Image: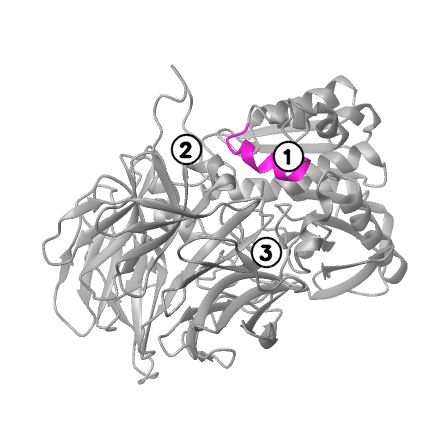
Amino acid sequence: MKISRWNSLRLAFQVAFLAGCLASVVAAQAQRTNTSARDLDLVAISPDGNRVAWVQSAVNASGEPTGGSAIYVQDLKSPSSKPKRISAGNDNQPASEDTIAWSPDSKHLAFLSDAEGDGQSNFYIVNVDGGGTRKLTSLKGYLADPAWSPDEKTLAFLFTENAPRAAGPLMPMVPETGVIDQKVYEQRLTLVDLASGKVRQLSPPDMYVYQYDWSPDGKTFAAIAAHGAGDSNWYVAELYTLNVESGEPKPVYKPSLQIAVPRWSPDGKTIAFIGGLMSDEGSIGGDIFTVSAAGGNARNVTPAIAASPSWLYWESPGSILFTEYIDGQAGFSRIDLSSGKLSALWTSPDLISTEFEGVPAVSLAADHQTSAVIRHSSTHPPEIWAGPTGEWKQVTRINEAVRPDWGQLKTLHWFNGETKLQGWLMYPTNYDPKQHYPMVVVVHGGPAGVSRVGWPEAFFNTYDLSAHGYFVLYPNPRGSFGEGEKFTQANVKDFGYGDFQDILKGVDEIVKTLPVDNNRIGMTGWSYGGYMTMWAVTQTNRFRAAVAGAGLVNYQSYYGQNDIDEWMPPYFGVNVYDDPAVYAKSSPITFIKNVKTPTLVLVGQYDGECPVPQSREFWHALKTLGVETQLVIYPGEGHEFLQPEHRQDVIARLIKWFDHYLKPVAGSH
C-alpha cells in the first residue's frame, strides 16, 4: 500500500522484456522528472574495488533520449578516464540493458539485455578488459537478480517462466476472466552453467522465491519463499535453505512478521535477515535477526534500535554492517554481535542506494571498506559515488548542470503528547517571509514507509507544488520507518487515529511558526497517503481541498478486492471475516457523511494494491452527498504509473485542483 520510492522492484529498467509495455517503459525512463536530469540506476562495485558499473538512460550525441538504457564501467584507478560502455547491442539499435552482477574475480560482468529486438531480456556475459559479449540464456519470461557462485562456474537468478507481466504488485494487474486461480506463475530460483549454458530451475515449481543468497561454500542457498502466488504471499514467506544439487527446500525459520535480505555469515553457520512490520514487498525496514543455518529460534540483535535497518552485510562472523532509515535520514552502521554495541559510521539527509528509487543500500566490495552508491538530495540530482564507505568521491558528473526549480527543504520535529515526530518542510520557490502562503500536506505511502530528502521521483512528484507557491509538508507519523520497530508498529489496529493526530500536530506547529495561511491548507498522498487523505476529509473540515491517489475507503470490501490481502491481518490483528468491526473503525466510508472538502480522486485502471472500486466508491459517495469531486481512472496503469503522459497529467491535475480551491485570486499567494 505504497508509492515506491523505497521499493526494490525494478519498476522500469527491468520490465522492458514485456513487448506490449516496452515503448511506454522506455519513454518513462527518458522522462523521470520535470527537469532534465539523466537516470542513473543499479550501481555495482567490483569485488576488488577497482571498477564501478551502473545503468543510465540512453541518449544520442546531442543528449536527446533515444529510448532504452545503457551500462557503463568506470576504472576507479583512473578517475580521469572515460567510462566504458558495455553492450550486447549497437548504436543503431538501442537496447534496454540493466541488472548487472560482477564475477568474484572482478573480470566479468553479467547483465540483462533485449538486444535481439524482440522485447525479451536475457543474460549476457562480457569480459570488461576486452573481448566479445556472449549470450548466456535464451529464456521466455521475467529474469531478475543475478548472483555468481563463489567458484564462478554458475550464475543464479530469479526466473518467472512465460510471465504475463513483470513481477510485483505495483505493476498493472492482468485483467481477470474465466476461471480464477487456475494458473499461478512462480518466480523460481534458477541456475545456468557458465560453460555449457545449461539452465536448471532449482526451487520447486509450487514455490515463489523472493530473495536469496549463496552460501560461502556454494553448496546451499538461503531463500525467502512461500508456496502459492507471489504478490500476496510475500507477507507469509519463510526462510529456507535449498541444496544446490537437489533443490530440496528445508525450513529454517517461520517468522511472525515479514522478513527480507537473507545473508549468510562468512563461516556459513548463520543466516541474518531483517524482520518487522513491512506493509509492502520491497519496502524494507525492521530489526536485524540471526538464526542458525540448521534452524531454530531467531535472535533479535537490534531490539532497541531507534532506526529501521534496511540492508545488511556481514563484515565478519562477529559483526554486521547495515544501512538504515534514521530520523528521516539515511545511515550506515555496524553492530558487534557479541556485545550488541552499535557504531554509527555515516548519517546524512542525502539518499544513498544502489537503485535510484530503492531502499538505503550500498554496493560493497570484498574488503568491506570500499563501496559505491547512487547519491542524491533535494538540491543535487543523482550521481555515482565510490570509495571508502561514508567518504565517497563523486565518480560521475552527468547531471551537474541540472538545477532544482523548487524551494528549500528543512527537517522539523514536533510532539503529539509524548511521541516525538519528524518530517520535512519544503518552502515555496523564491520564498518571501512577508507573504502568506497556502500549504499542502503530502502523506507518504506504506504505512511502513518514510518521507526522505532526495531528487524527486518520476511519479507523483509533489515538489512541483513548491514552484507553484506552496509550502509542502512531508510528515513521518507513527507507522513510518526511521524511529525503531515500536514506532513502526504503533498504528496497528489504529489506522486514522494516532497517525492522523500526529499529522495534525505537525500542521499546527507550522501554522504557529511560519507564514502559512490556516484557511488554505490541502492534503494529498498516494496509496496509504491516498487512504489518509480520504480519512482526513471525513474527520475534519480543516483541509480546504484534497487529492486522493489510489486510496482506500472501505477496508471491509477492500479485503476481498485487492491482490495483497495478506498484509492486512498483521495490522488489524485478524481477518475481516472474524472481526469486521476493527476494519470498519478505520474505514473512511463509516464517516463519509461528514465530508465537505472538494476532493479529486485518481487511480490506475489495473491497480492490484488499491483497486479502482475503492476510489469509485469514495467518489460515488461524495457525488451523492453533493461534495465537489472528480474521478480519473488512468488506462493501463497499475499502482505506480509507467507512462510519462499519465505521470505528468497526475501532477498537472493536482496543481490545478489546489490552485482552484487554495488560491482565491488566480496567480496570488
Please tell me whether residue 564 belongs to the stretch shown in magenta. Answer: yes
Q: 475 or 72, which lies in front?
A: 475
The magenta stretch is 562-572
Q: Secondary structure at mark 3?
A: loop
Mark 2–mark 1 Cα distance, whole angstroms, equals: 24 Å
- Residue placed under numbered mark 3 in the picture: 286
Q: Measuring from the top left, give residue 619's x and y in whole percent.
A: 68, 25
Label 2, on which residue? Answer: 229
User: Main structural element of the magenta stretch: helix, strand or loop?
Assistant: helix
Tell me if 116 is positioned left or right of 430 in this view: left
Mark sitting on residue 551 = 1
Image coordinates of residue 591 in percent, x first then y, are 80, 26
Marks 2, 1: nearer the viewer: 2
Q: Which residue lies at the image location 77% right of the left edge and 51% below the top edge?
A: 439
Marks 2 and 3, the one that precedes in the sequence: 2
Q: Is residue 612 visible?
A: yes
Of labels 1 and 3, earlier in sequence is 3
> Cα distance, mark 1 to mark 3?
25 Å
In three-dimensional space, the C-alpha distance between marks 2 and 3, rounded to whole angstroms, equals 24 Å
Image quadrant assignment for residue 470 = bottom right
Q: Going by the picture, which residue comes out furthest to the right? A: 512
Q: Nearer the viewer, residue 435 or 368?
A: 368
Mark 3 packing: few (<14 Cα in 10 Å), some, or many (20+)? many
Residue at the location (41% across, 19% down)?
Answer: 180
Q: Relative to 595, is 346 on the left or the right? A: left
Which residue is rendered at x = 50% and y = 82% of the image?
391
- Total labels: the figure holds 3
Q: Is any atom of residue 40 visible in this view?
A: no
Helix, strand or loop at label 1? It is loop
Going by the numbered disc 3, the residue's amino acid type is Gly
Q: Measured along the vertical axis of the image, is residue 354 above or below residue 596? A: below
For image coordinates 25% across by 52% down, the residue present is: 244
